[in-house]
Image: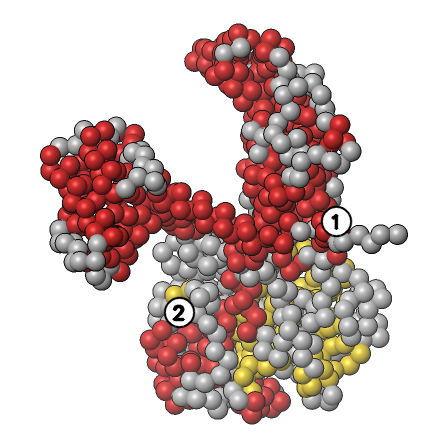
Amino acid sequence: MTNHRLTFAAAIAVLAASLSLSSLLIGTSWLVASVGAVAAVALAATLTRLPAPQAAIAATIAVLAAAVPVLAGYGWPGGVGALVFLGLTAASATGARLLRVFAACATYLAVPFLYLNAVFAGPSSWAAVIPTSRSLTALLNLPSHVGTDFNYSPPVPTTRSVELITVAGVTMVAICVDVIAVRLRRPALAGLPLLLLFSVPVASSLKSFGILQTLLFGVAVAAYLGLLSSDGRQRLRMWGRLVTIRRTHATDDAGEGPDTRQVAASGRRVGLTAVALAMVVPVFLAGTPPKDLFAKTAAGGVGGGLAIPGALAPLDSVGQQLTDKPVPVLTYTTSYADPEQQYLEEFVLNYDFSAGGKWLPSASSGQTVTSARLPYQVPGLTNAVPVTIVRTSVSLAHPVDSPMPLPYAPVEVSAPGSRLTETANTLMVFGNGQLRSPKYTVVSKEAQPTAVDLGIPGAYPQSIQKVYAGYRGPDARQLLRIARQHTKGATTALAKANALQHWFTSGAFTYTVHEKWQDSGPWLLSFLTTNRRGDCEQFAPAFAVLAKLLGLPARVAIGYTGGTVGPHNTWQVTTADAHAWPELYFPGAGWTRFEPTPAGSEGVAGQGTATAPIYSTVPLSTGLGAPGQQPNTSPSAAAGPSAKPKSALPNHQVQAGNGPAGSGLGGGSGFPVWILVVAAILLLLAGPALARWLTRRRRWLSAGTDSGRAHVAWREFRDDLTDYGVTSAPSESPRAVARRVAAEAQLDAAAAAAITRIGAAEERARYSLGSVPAGGLRADVATVRGALAASATKRQRLRARCLPPSTMTAAFSGLQSTGRALHWLDSPLPTWRRGRPRTEP
């Protein structure tokens, strides 16, 4: 009965702890499947505790059902191995201890496997339960589809692959908890596997915890303490395990049994310690949670009283988004022929010398949108340039208050229930407060200029020339010389722009997200001459400044690249697609984008979904392309709509714009996480031996007198005895210990003499008032240690070197001392009340 109660309590504890995963996953299907998995583990646990014949029959049936795919589809080696496994399981009916342990482990694995197979590969199974080769293949293939789902910050959609990973993890925790709490009767230690379920959501989404998550955490703690109480009901209140058929003592029922409160408090202390670790440790392990793009808010008043929400310096936010773990931003469908060329623009920035040389949102006035038709015309666009009308339907992952992500140039926006404002010239559209609906539709007028269209000379409007051309920032003379050097021979605006783009992407610069953006100051000169490292937040302003110095009107746009295509031609955009790019003004075509951000080097991709526009990649012999380039009419040179940087990768393979997913720690830090894992494992394995060496060294360094050296030699000698399994009673004198060890350990004459000298020195240091001959004691200790190692078995030598018992005992004592910090739990309110004196009536 006690085991059944513990099994039930263990299952409840696991289910309560798994509720904490609700902050990571969308939906409840994983929870329903987890309930079944925990029930399967409880069933397996019950079967293992049947009498030997019945347990052997149950284990054999479960293993036979689970081994059907191996017997049927893996040839004679697999069949022979499965038959041997079955034979050992069936042989557990003899009651042999090792065979029963083997059968119990097989049952713990086979029964949950049958459940997982039935839930996740039932249609491919025989009778929807018995696994087959097809169901096993389907089950093993599911985790391979989970990679992209876990690239995003929580909560993530509960796909079948995510659900399988979650349920399998809960199953393994349930097995560990049942084995530790029920079979080993160590329910307090069961808090360690439960700690895994607590730690995952805390480490992944600490800042998203709310009232609901707090209540669920309290439920999990209560269930864990219930598990402790279930075991303590029999073990603690009865002063040990019950070995008779009686359930309780009469004195226990009357409340007059022995006082075991001090013993019971130890379970509370361990439980509270595990809970504290679950809450505190992940705080130090968790990385910085991803933030919404441009989440800073400021009432940045821009001409005409127009307040543009969002960061006053949006470039500051781009680099942060590229180093954080990708977060879904939006999905969209579009009628555009090549969505990879369709960037989604939010902010338009211009260099403001009067504001300290910062790139700030550029807007002179704004107008409220009263209908789907936007109030402003597309600046500079004429009928001389081909135009495509594109319809794009956007669905935001979260409502925004910053300018809406729109394809340039929008002419109509339909966002039901939202009040919108459009800025003049820049055509930024944003809501007055958050959008009421996360879905909206945009009609945009997409210019399709060719290199010939952009090469036609024309005069810039005075308003454009005055605001966007020219540069009055630091190092203007040196920067102008650099711009002219790299556009030498270019005679048209397009040729100069293409020459600059070619210089940035030709390999002279290195793409990295670890170069901090500097919004002001003389950063640009060192970037172009010596450093030459950065991402789009450096390359876009650098390109724009050089263009301004050459007399070309330039600005910087911030938003998203086209993203990656998903099911049903739905494109997906994440914060990994956050991007900054320069735009130049061409008469007749208006604002036209360029792509100076290079691809990565040494196998590391740049911003993987960035694409170079067609007119900037086609070399021409008419002076419109980059200087020095010759015409190339080969098919590979005909840049189509999907022309990309050389080594760009698809977005689902790029982690935070800085390499393949999973290539770095924290979603794009570039640091290989396996190094930390290996270092942690090596440190854990070498920890006890290192601690023993440091202790020995510290002792000898701190021994400043002859008496001190004698005491250190004696302590080292006693620790060496402990490490090699030689006992010594505290009541023995140093001389008695030395004489007995020399005789029992069968040491040679040199070691025996060394022991005698160590013992004599310790006695003199303790009791003599005269001088203590301490010379040579360190060498004597080393001699004795070597003799003990020579006389010990290989196992004892290995333990003494890798896991020295003297160090391990000290570590366990330290843990027990830490537990005394919770001594206040030993004095609950009932104890205090019983201690109060009673007043006679």
Circles 2 and 1 in contact, beta carbons < 8 Å: no
Which image quarter holds the N terminus? top right
User: Residue 735's image quarter?
Assistant: top left
* In this picture, residue 699 sits left or right of residue 266: left
* SS for dot 1: helix
Q: Nearer the viewer, mark 2 or mark 1?
A: 1
Task: Give the class, few, some or many, for how many residues have Cα within 10 Å of label 1's Cα (few <14, many ≥20).
Answer: few
Compared to 9, does 517 lie above or below? below
Q: Position of residue 695 (x, y in %)?
A: 31, 52
Marks 2 and 1 sit apart, C-alpha to C-alpha, by 73 Å
User: Residue 14's image quarter?
Assistant: top right
Compared to 149, does 136 lie above or below? above
Q: Which residue is mark 2?
A: 533
Q: Position of residue 465 (x, y in %)?
A: 57, 88
Type of amino acid under label 2: Arg
Question: Which of the marked residues, 2 or 1, is nearer the chain's N terminus?
Answer: 2
Compared to 661, does 244 lie above or below? above
Q: Position of residue 601 (x, y in %)?
A: 38, 59
**Is residue 753 or residue 540 the one in the foreground?**
753
Q: Position of residue 432 (x, y in %)?
A: 78, 75
Q: Residue at x 23, y 34 (%)?
A: 741
**Is residue 729 or residue 766 the one in the foreground?**
766
Q: Residue at x 72, y 24 (%)?
A: 247
Q: Which residue is mark 1?
A: 834
